[in-house]
Amino acid sequence: MTDLRTLLSNGLRPGVYRWQSDATADQVRRDVAGAGWDFVLLDTHEIHDKAGFLDLCATAFDLPRWFGRNWDALADSLSDRSTGEPEIVLWTGLHHLLEHDHDTVDVALQIFTEDTTASGQLRVLIQERPGAETPDLLGSQPVL
């Protein structure tokens, strides 16, 4: 487990990462704000499908009212909202969503990975509890 404050002070590069931590979302929010970065929480503990995930993204990322709630619209909206400011996205509950809708997790990870490359804004931390089993889908994501 890597301390988030250390990661932020060292200039965490854009990307999608597996992060083993017991930190609460409030603790992460405080650390991120203290470092002067923006924070977005994606909590998918209660999400079961694509529609629920896209609704969550619309709220969490404060997307415009015209957001089309499809994958292309999510990709476009994320790139359109780029402020140039570094942003930490904490994704909790990914394993729950993965159990219910594997395809949604797969496509979401692709979109986030593409956006981190294109905008250089997002740093997506997929929170895992220390010692938890990691699904194969996440095996290729760097571990912090």
Image (cartoon, rainbow, N blue to C red):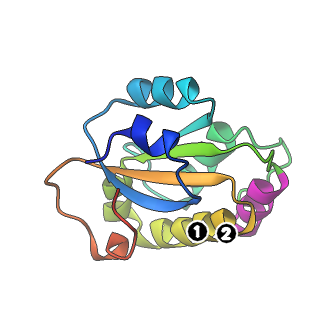
Q: Quadrant of residue 83?
A: top right
Q: Position of residue 101 (x, y in %)?
A: 41, 66
List the residue tagged with mark 1: 113
Q: Quadrant of residue 115?
A: bottom right
Q: Which mark is residue 6?
A: none
Q: 42 or 124: which is nearer to us?
A: 124
Q: Is residue 4 visible?
A: yes
Question: Residue at the spot x=58%, y=35% of the render?
Answer: 39
Q: Are marks 1 and 2 in contact (CB under 8 Å)?
A: yes
Q: Is residue 76 magenta?
A: yes
**Which range of residues does the magenta coloring cover?**
70-80
- Pick whichever, 97 or 31, lies toward us: 31
Q: Main secondary structure of the magenta part?
A: helix
Q: Residue at x 83, y 42 (%)?
A: 64
Task: State the SS at label 2.
Answer: helix
Q: Residue at x 43, y 31 (%)?
A: 28
- Residue at (47% x, 73% y) in the render: 103
In the image, farthest residue toward the front: 10
Quadrant of the rendered image containing residue 73: bottom right
C-alpha distance separating marks 1 and 2 = 6 Å
- Residue 131 percent coordinates (x, y): 13, 54
Q: Is residue 64 above or below residue 30?
A: below
**Foreground tag (1 vs 2):** 2
Residue placed under numbered mark 2 in the picture: 117
- Residue 57 in the figure: left or right of residue 143: right
Near-viewer residue (56 or 41)? 41
